[in-house]
Amino acid sequence: SGESVELLCKVAGTLPLICTWMKFRKQLQENEHIKIENAENSSMLTISSTKQEHCGCYTLVVENKLGSKQAQVNLTVVDKPDPPAGTPCASDIRSSSLTLSWYGSSYDGGSAVQSYSVEIWDTVDKKWTDLTTCRSTSYNAHDLLADREYKFRVRAANVYGISEPSHESELVKVGKKEEGPKEEEEAEGSDDEKETEIDYRTVSINTEEKVSEFYHVEERLGSGKFGQVFRLVEKKGGKVWAGKFFKAYSAKDKENIRQEISIMNCLHHPKLVQLVDAFEEKANIVMVLEM
């Protein structure tokens, strides 16, 4: 990311030759980041200061009076990952421990995320410190003190670097809850909680139908080594979702993704992005998520 890239293609044929660079079926135009140089026997596309948005399939179309030919090249811009999506969520809060859960990065930087770094802050020390490094998207934090409140944030790491931190979790306090008036307040607020209660879904993978039968697949929001994220618009109702398209060529790949879907079916919390649909199509498995 941030470096210049040159896509050079040698061409031959009866002159004159017309060379046109395309991306996602749209002709590329020169701008401050894109330069196109055509010669009799070559065409070069230069992209300066590459970013994630420059990832994708580029096509060179060469035409003359006898017909046309084309060649394609896929460009992946590698970088450190995006921050973990959403907000870390604390659950199973006990006298001196809790379970922290979070989601992975929406874009892995073109290289698989290898680990997550969890950072902790409390109302006494008032500074961020490293808590742990782990490979999963949850961690059991222990030896916490009841005389302070805590919040957490998470960074993702791949071979190219460490991401910026995620959103900070809400302040959370361990220890037993006070009894008496506090219970009454909670009881009084129970009606409001019922009004805003979320209808969580347990999603089964649809293997009979395609995601395109229920959703319009629109622009790409991000991409990585294992798949891409697209904006989805529900055909019935017009709701907007995020579609995570995984490449799953082997039985092992598919089983790993099925396990992730199973885990997400268990992670029901207002602060966690929820899974709303899932489809399995040949070499792809699609997860439909809240935006």
Image (tube, rainbow, N blue to C red):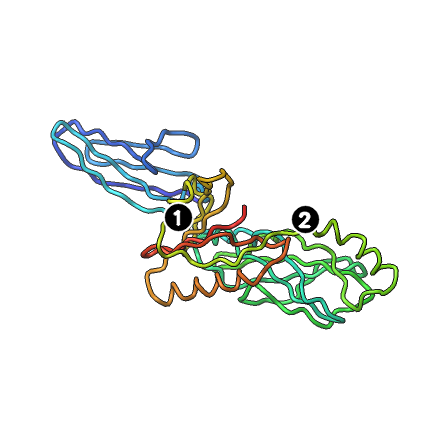
Eyeballing the image, is 140 above or below 249? below
Residue 248 visible? The answer is: yes
Q: Residue at x 14, y 28 (%)?
A: 15
Tag 2: residue type? Thr
- In the depicted view, which residue is nearer to us: 176 or 37? 176
Mark 2 crowdedness (10 Å alpha carbons): few <14, some 14-19, many ≥20:
few
Mark 1 crowdedness (10 Å alpha carbons): few <14, some 14-19, many ≥20:
many
The earlier-in-sequence mark between 1 and 2 is: 2
**Mark 1 element type:** helix
Tag 1: residue type? Val
Quarter-wise, where is residue 206 in the image? bottom left
Q: Which residue is mark 1?
A: 211
Q: Position of residue 93 (x, y in %)?
A: 71, 66
**Mark 2 element type:** loop
How far apart are labels 1 and 2 at the CA level? 29 Å
Q: Residue at x 46, y 65 (%)?
A: 259
- In the depicted view, which residue is nearer to us: 173 or 224? 173
Quarter-wise, where is residue 185 in the image? bottom right
Q: Which residue is mark 2?
A: 196
Disc marking residue 134? none
Q: Position of residue 59 (x, y in %)?
A: 28, 39
Q: Position of residue 105 (x, y in %)?
A: 52, 54
The answer to whether 96 appears left or right of 246 in the picture is right
